[in-house]
Image (cartoon, grey):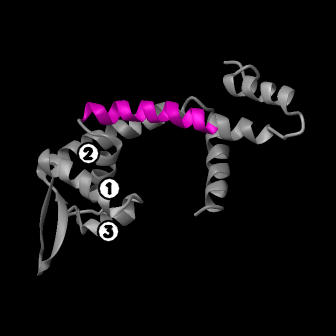
Amino acid sequence: MSETLDRVARIQDAWRRERPDVDVAPQGIIGRLHRLAAHLDDELDTVYGRHGLGFGEFDVLATLRRAGAPYERAPGEIAQHTMVTTGAVTKRLDRLVAAGLVERRPAEGDGRRRVVALTREGLRVIDAAFTEHMTNERRLVDQLAPADQAALERILRRWLAAYE
């Protein structure tokens, strides 16, 4: 693996030649993060697909699973825990209901309130998908030495905190 002649470095070299007045050093980080994210998305999507899911469906099922038994949340809570709009959650829920992985029902004790809950099949699917997902993530991060993993996590946590 060449660290000096990758695609981002070639792009930076071209910009340095064409625009020596502009600092293109940040492109080395941002460009590589973008490229790496695309590769990682492909690797993650492969696992989701093996379980008949896309990222959005996996995200909703995982949100319900993390809620603990009885594995249910109100639709608005799902939106808060997945960081997507309620409209996007509705589309995901429609697909999951059609697949028999979740059900919409009245909340216990308050028939006016609606919740979304995992079905038995939904619980089976998310448990299998999550187990494989974490094995896959371990495989991906293990491309880095343990010390690099720890350093990268610290750096990304600090950087992300600036936005969140």
Q: Which of 11 and 45 is in front in this view?
A: 11
Q: Do the residues labelled 2 and 1 touch (CB within 8 Å)?
A: no
Q: Is residue 61 above or below residue 149?
A: below
Location of the C terminus by quadrant is bottom right
Sequence-earlier tag: 1 or 3:
3
Please state which of the two labelled residues, at mark 1 or mark 3, is closer to the viewer.
1
- How far from the left and from the top, in percent, is residue 149? 61, 40
List the single residue furthest toward the right.
21
* Most common secondary structure along the magenta stretch: helix
- How far from the left and from the top, in percent, is residue 115? 18, 68
Q: Is residue 123 above or below residue 117?
A: above
Q: In this view, does 13 lie above or below 28?
A: above
Query: What residue is rendered at 79% in x and 30% in y?
Result: 15
- Span colored in magenta: 33-51
| Mark drawn on residue 77 | 3
Mark 1, residue position: 88
